[in-house]
Image: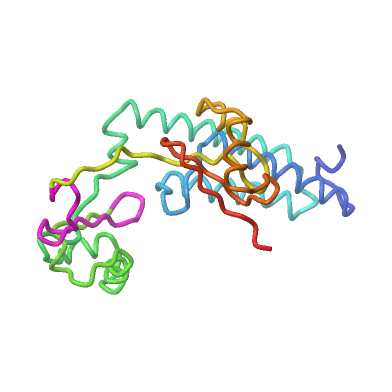
Amino acid sequence: MAFFYGQETLTAIQWALRAIIGFFFLLFAMKLMGERSISQLRLIDFTIALIIGNILAHPLSDEKLGMKGSLISTAVLIFLYISSVYATLKWGNLRKMMEPSPYPLIKNGELIYPNLKKARITIDHLLSELRKEKIEDIQKVALALWEPDGTISFFLSPQHQALTPQDLQLPTNPFSFPMVIVKEGKVDFGSLTSMGKDVEWLQTKFTINNVQTSDILLATVDDSDKVTIYLYER
C-alpha cells in the first residue's frame, strides 16, 4: 500500500495501481451522483465534475502526493452534491436558483434578440439548431425555449405540424415495443420469461424460419408474437 501515500518515486506498477483505484473510485462516485449525458449537465453538475476531476488528477500525476486526501475531499464533495440535490427537491426557491426556468428565443416566428444575448448564443448557432430539427424557416416556429441544460426546444405553429392518424380520424394499432430475445447468438432468457415464453416456443419459431441460434445477430418479438430475425452476414 506504499503507492497510496506520497513517495519520492513510484514504479510503473504503483502508478498503474493508483490509476486503477482512481478509476473505480470515480465510477463509484458517478454512480452515487446519478447519470447524465454531457448535454444534460446542470450548472451544479458541471461544476462538481470539474472539481472532482481536478482533485483526482493531482495524485495520479504527482508521486509526492498521497491519494488519501483526494479521496476524502471527493467523498465530502459527493455528500454535499447529493445533499444539494435533495435540497432543491424540497425548497422551490433553491431549485429556481439552481435550475432557472426556460425562456423564449423565438415566439410566433419572431426572434427575441435580448434573450439570445442572455443565453449567450449567436444567430448562427440558433440557425444551426433549427437545421438539426429540419426547420428551414424561423416563421414556422411558434415557440423556441432555451432550456436550463443548454438545449433548445422547438414547437412549430399548428399549420406547419405534421398530420397524425388522430387528425385524420384513422384507426391505429396499440403501441408495441419489440423485446430482444436473441443478441449475438445468445438467448436472453430474462426477456423470454418476462413475456411468458419458453425455450421450446423460441425454438419452434427458429425452426419455422429455418435458422439456428448461433446464426442470429439479433432477434426481437412484439406483442403479437411476431419474430423479426437479423442474421450474421456470411
Looking at the magenta stretch, what is its main secondary structure?
loop
Q: How many marks?
A: 0
- Image coords of residue 191 (percent x, y): 55, 33
Q: Is residue 136 left or right of residue 160?
A: right
User: With respect to residue 12, does 207 lie above or below?
Assistant: above
Q: Which residues are magenta?
A: 147-168
> Where, quadrant-wise, is the N terminus in this rendering?
top right
Magenta-span inclusion, residue 153? yes
- Image coords of residue 10 (percent x, y): 87, 51
User: With respect to residue 160, does 52 lie above or below?
Assistant: above
User: With respect to residue 136, does 197 lie above or below?
Assistant: above
Q: Residue at x 47, y 53 (%)?
A: 38
184 or 149, nearer to the observer = 184
Magenta-span inclusion, residue 157? yes
Q: Residue furthest bottom?
A: 124
Q: Residue at x 31, y 66 (%)?
A: 129
84 or 214, nearer to the observer = 214
Q: Is residue 6 left or right of residue 147?
A: right
> Where, quadrant-wise, is the C terminus in this rendering?
bottom right
Q: Is residue 46 left or right of residue 2?
A: left
Q: Residue at x 67, y 42 (%)?
A: 186
- Image coords of residue 204 (percent x, y): 60, 36
Using the rendered view, name the quadrant where residue 30 is placed. Answer: top right
Using the rendered view, name the quadrant where residue 98 is placed. Answer: top left
Q: Residue at x 35, y 29 (%)?
A: 89
Color theme of the render: rainbow
- Image coords of residue 54 (percent x, y): 60, 51
